[in-house]
Image (cartoon, rainbow, N blue to C red):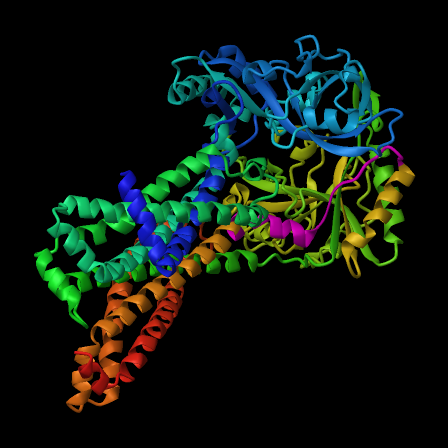
Amino acid sequence: MIKDLQSAFRQLLKQPGFALIAVLVLALGIGANTAIFSVVNAVLLRPLPYPQPDDLVVLRERTASFPNGSVSYPNYLDWRAGQHSFTDLSLVRRDSFNMAIPGGQRAPERIGGARVSFNYLSILKMKPIIGRDFTEVDDTAGSAPVVLIGETVWRTRFGSSPKVLGQQIIVDGLSREIIGVLPEAIKFPRLSQIWVPLAELRKVEGVLNRGNHPGFSVLGRLRPGVSLKKANADLDTIAVALEKEYPKSNTTHRVQMIRLLESAVAEYRQSLNLLLAAVGCVLLIACANVANLQLARALSRAKELAIRAALGASRWRLARQLLTESILLAFLGAAAGVLLAIWSLDLIVALCPANIPRFKETRIDAMALLYTGIVAFGAGILAGIWPAWQISHTAALSVALHEAGARGGSSGIAKQRARSGLVITQVALALVLLAGAGLTLKSFWHAQSAPLNFDPHNILLTSIELPKAKYEKDKNGQKVWDDDKLRAFWDRLLDRVRVLPGVEAAAIGSNIPFDDSEWDTSFHITGTPKPEPGQEPSAEVDIVSPDYFKVMKLPILRGRAFAPEDGPDESRSRSIIIDQTFAERYFPGKDPLGLHIDDNQRSGAADDDPEKYPPLTIVGIVPRTRNEAAGENNVEKLNFVHMYFCATQNPAPGNMLMLRVLGDPKALTAAVRREVQAIDPEQPIAEVTTMEENISNSLAARRLTMALLGAFAGVALVLASVGLYGVMALSVTQRTRELGIRLALGAPRRNVFRLVLGQGAMLVSLGIGLGLLGALAGSRALSSVLYGVGPLDFGALAIAIFSLAFVALLACWLPARRATLVDPIKALRAE
């Protein structure tokens, strides 16, 4: 083997041009595989940084109409008490908090975090870096307020000082004692840096309502030997019992389980697997290209190989030498490919969804290098096996020796067919990638241009969450939100920002389009028969201030927008605006204006006393808006109708401040922050963005698939065309004598041109025919990530075929033209 390697190095040094081209071609194929595998490894394969991570499971509630709903707090308590499949269950809710350090130099800020039950860390089997975990006492209503902070907060705000333990920080207006620091490895829920116990929520009336689902998920760890299927059956048995006991709130409710890793990456698995398949096709094309180069190179080495055979080298020995050279080329290509992958990773990560931390963890690690080595070895075998077999199985090496000494000798029909077969394969694979790229491009275009029914341009957005500690009151011995304080803050803020230079309109809203939140509720139209439990229709809920429709440039189709008369008078019916889909679906042939919907929002149940809670009155109808990226979200796929509540009548502590401005929206960021803190100096603003940015971010997964698949298709097209050109150029060189004779006998040069071009066209046609079959199969695999495009989209296929045929025939045209320039006298004299 050492002798083979030494010989391989010498051979490559003798032909540096061939070696350079082969290495570059393989670098493209292997580098693309390394880059995409690095993403796949970071997102899909790398285990979670917890002990026995496969035992961690996320539990949610599923119903007949909603497959992935949040968990009711009372249901969680019953699940935990009755289950036998998990070591324990923890209640978790992703949240964000206003954080301030007393006497600190930093301004108040909004930080991602979570509310968790006391057993959260024990289920993860993780411990604080310093300090202690929550105890059951910390998680009891009325306990002293405590907090766990993340390693990043500890490092950036407290200089990694161990004296942080026992210090007080202000979290949502409440002073809490820091009792521990959690390691950076803990990333559930994602982007969390502050953890507080559930203590203060355990006595909140809305949380105790079994029919309310306030955003909770459940984290569990499977007992040893218990499968996910068995655990699901165990919990569903409890769910069936709860359905019988609480039919109004729990009918059709079952338990959905998914492993923790899968819950984080499931929506990206299909796209990443498709990209991995795409780079596999690119690698196959690169290998076919190098195999063709090897076959062509073998012609010039026929005499050498024949002499080796004559001196006693076996055919296996000859084949091994060629395979060694091919594998050496592949590993050189892999080294260059790793450099290419490192260079391209920043660009790839920039295209990835920004709010998914695992994408940001993409790097070239030991696993990626091992994968690259395996791919390089496989590529070397693939690129060298066919040339090695062709050479070592030559019918008579003495004939090869004789042919090698002749000028203008042919390589033989078998070798020509081998090279032609490799070109056909390249063309077919290139067509598969081009068709896939065309489908994803068309899908992205459809998703991006899907009607929004509002104007997203020049809208500044910033999230503001008011702390309960500052905006609460006592009610029957319990701390509840003070609606009057909430209204006063939002009214003052809107009055101040409306007069800022360049502001056309200002509003607040919750669950607005593209804000990465979901809020749906069941409803009942007053005066109609009540549906069976579990069969109630659902709608998305938006709570907005009166000028919301001006900010969004959302027209009122009928009726009116919210107005000053929609005040907070509890004795009056509250107003509601519905979208056009709601009107058409639930009021067919009727004018819904002035009709009523039961006030479930306030009563909590459809059959509460309507005299205590007057039904909602429909005052307006607006067009249906798109709240999530087309085809990307479960709620979007469920096609819920929309209901708009007036923020004056339904004050919320958290809202998105929305400003329609002239010019650059973000130029007003400093002014908005100044106006907020003029009202409350401790109130931060967060998530400063624009509506256009939010829409763009919602399409990140589609953009990643489209951009990379398009790039790989372009590489495949170039490689296939270069391979075709190489085969046709070699064919013209080998047929110089034949073409010279044809011309000497009077054949018009245009006939010679057509002859050579026809040979290339035949290869292209066969490749396209074979590629069509692959494209049809591949398009079906793409169907789950397409939007507004069928897997058999003839337009995308036609463009792919035309593009490939044009470039491929151009690659054939150059050798065909060279064939017409053959001088018959020189060609015959050379013989």
Which contiguous range is marked in magenta? 680-703
Residue 191 is a magenta residue:
no
Note whether residue 65 is visible.
no
Q: Residue at 27% of width from left, 43% of height from top?
A: 4
Image position of 389 (left or right of 372): left
Left or right of residue 271: residue 542: right
Residue 782 vs residue 634: left or right?
left
**Rendered location of residue 108, percent (x, y):** 82, 33
| Picture coordinates of residue 519, whole percent (x, y) | 62, 38
Q: Nearer the viewer, residue 815 or 472?
A: 815
Residue at 21% in and 51% down: 388
Q: Examine the rendered structure and indicate whether residue 67 appears above or below residue 220.
A: below
Residue 448 lies in quadrant: bottom right
Q: In front here: 624 or 96?
A: 96
The location of residue 265, given as percent across then percent down, is 50, 36
Decide if residue 557 is in sight here. yes
Quarter of image, res 765: bottom left
Q: Does the magenta stretch include residue 685?
A: yes
Query: From this viewpoint, which residue is outermost toward the front?
Result: 311
> x, y (%) of residue 150?
69, 24
